[in-house]
Amino acid sequence: MEHKIRVLVAKPGLDGHDRGALVIAQGLRDAGMEVIYTGLRQTPEQIVAAAIQEDVDCIGLSSLSGAHMELFPEVVRLLKAEGIEDILVIGGGVIPDEDIPGLLQAGIAAIFTPGTPIQETADFIRKNVKRGSAS
């Protein structure tokens, strides 16, 4: 039986806008992935706990509030503190180009900004997921 990729879509911090995250969640479902959406205003600790509980292959973080430089790396740090290094972590949202290298250096596998085709995001996840077999 083939493993269906499980993606946790999360909105860390106080950002109250989730339209983009919901569009991505639906697009990844349409691409054949199983998607869990955490809802708004999640702490990095809540996101990591949900990822562990749901046994996900990928965490997709969405931020429009400007707090991505603190919140995205904190999710990666907490995963490592739990000894988890096989969950792919990606990010998206309104993220300035000059912040992307720092996020990549902090362990975020890729950043997808507005206008990125959902298929591109789905293809990246399939190609880079570290657990199970891609579907």
Image: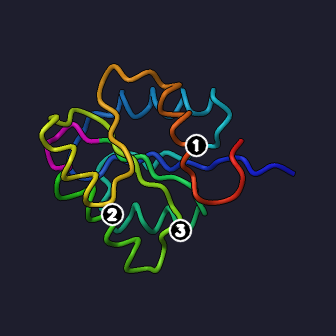
Main secondary-structure element of the magenta-colored stretch: loop
Name the residue rendered at 53%, 25% in the picture. 119
Asked if residue 66 lies in the magenta stretch, the reply is: yes
- Residue 67 left/right relative to 109: left
Q: Tell me where residue 23 sits by quadrant.
A: top left
| Gap in angstroms between the C-alphas marked 2 and 3 | 12 Å
Which residue lies under the disc numbered 2?
A: 75
- Residue position marked by numbered label 3 in the rendering: 52
Q: Give the percent coordinates (x, y) of residue 2.
A: 81, 49
Q: Is residue 89 magenta?
A: no
Determine whether label 3 and label 1 are within 8 Å by CB. no
Question: Identity of the amino acid at label 3?
Answer: Ile
Which residue is disc 1 drawn over?
127
Q: Check disc 2 and give the amino acid type.
A: Val
- Span shown in magenta: 63-68
Who is closer to the viewer here, 36 or 71?
A: 71
Circle 3 crowding by C-alpha within 10 Å: few under 14, some 14–19, many from 20: some
